[in-house]
Image: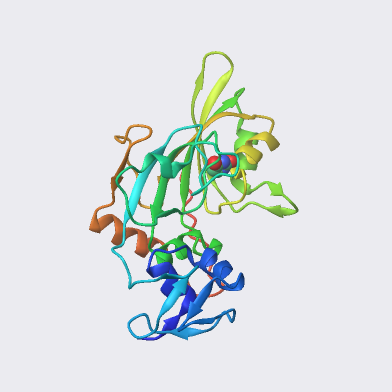
Amino acid sequence: MQARLQKILSQAGVASRRAAEKLIADGRVTVNGVTVREMGTKADPALDDIRVDGRRVKGPERHRYILLNKPAGYVTTRSDPQRRPTVIDLLRGVREYVYPVGRLDYDTEGLLLLTNDGDLAARLTHPRHGVERTYEARVAGIPDEDDLERLRRGIPLDGRRTLPADVVLVYPRRGGESVLRLTIREGRKRQVRRMCEAVGHPVRALRRVRIGPLEDRTIEPGQWRELTAQEVAALRRASRPRPAGASPRVERSR
Ligand code: URA
């Protein structure tokens, strides 16, 4: 069956949809011996000879859905120009070309999804679908009700206010720190760190504890497990596109 080249490449596990577009733009993809740079080009992996850098691209490979508990000190990328350890280094035995869905900072710990399912990855990272992510942040000081309300209503970052968030003060700790649980619906760069900084309570440690329907406190840092079929189905439901103009799902629980 015919499909767009970038879709064929991502389904074959060659690269994410976006990275596949770059491969095409860079002139590294050929169909039946002809270099293709046109983005909408279609081909049929069963009939056409599709190659990246001269290597034949085969049909779709088995989809993998991996839930990793990322430790601090790892970069969320497939390869790091600075040669720091990457999350891929933790996935011994995974032969498929999985890539991280979204990003956790080098210093952030917690749940990270990796997959070679380009469709689901694209849906989960699309801002309009608003899949919730929950973080636990150890912050300096003890935010008061006013600070918590500002975080809930949204903080202007780069000229645009963050979407409403659920924010709970879990407990104040000794030593002038406290733990906040924040549920946000976007994935802006260093969002939680910048939000907390803006209300005068910088983050000292950050961990993601939930991605949409996925939660698991039993995975040790650096370890991973495969999602169950039920979890994959729940993720698909949670990332289903909503009609244009619909507001993001916001459940206000405090
Ligand atoms: N917000 C941040 O500030 N950092 C992360 O890694 C994730 C969310």
Using residue 224 as the reference point, say whether residue 248 is left or right of it: right
Q: Quadrant of ligand 1?
A: top right
User: Residue 85's spot in the image, x, y percent?
Assistant: 49, 36
Q: Residue at x 28, y 63 (%)?
A: 62
Residue nearest the viewer, comparing 57 with 112: 57
Relative height, residue 183 to residue 206 (above, below): below
Counting from the top left corner in percent of width and height, residue 99 is at 44, 54
Residue 254 appears in view:
no
Q: Nearer the viewer, residue 45 or 111?
A: 45
Up/down of 173 relative to 48, above or below: above
Residue at x 71% of width, y 49% of height: 156
In this view, which residue lies farthest toward the left? 229
Q: Is residue 166 above or below residue 38?
A: above
Q: Position of residue 133 (x, y in %)?
A: 47, 48
Q: Is residue 114 left or right of residue 226?
A: right
Which residue does the image show at 37% across and 80% down from the upper left? 45
- Quadrant, the N terminus: bottom left
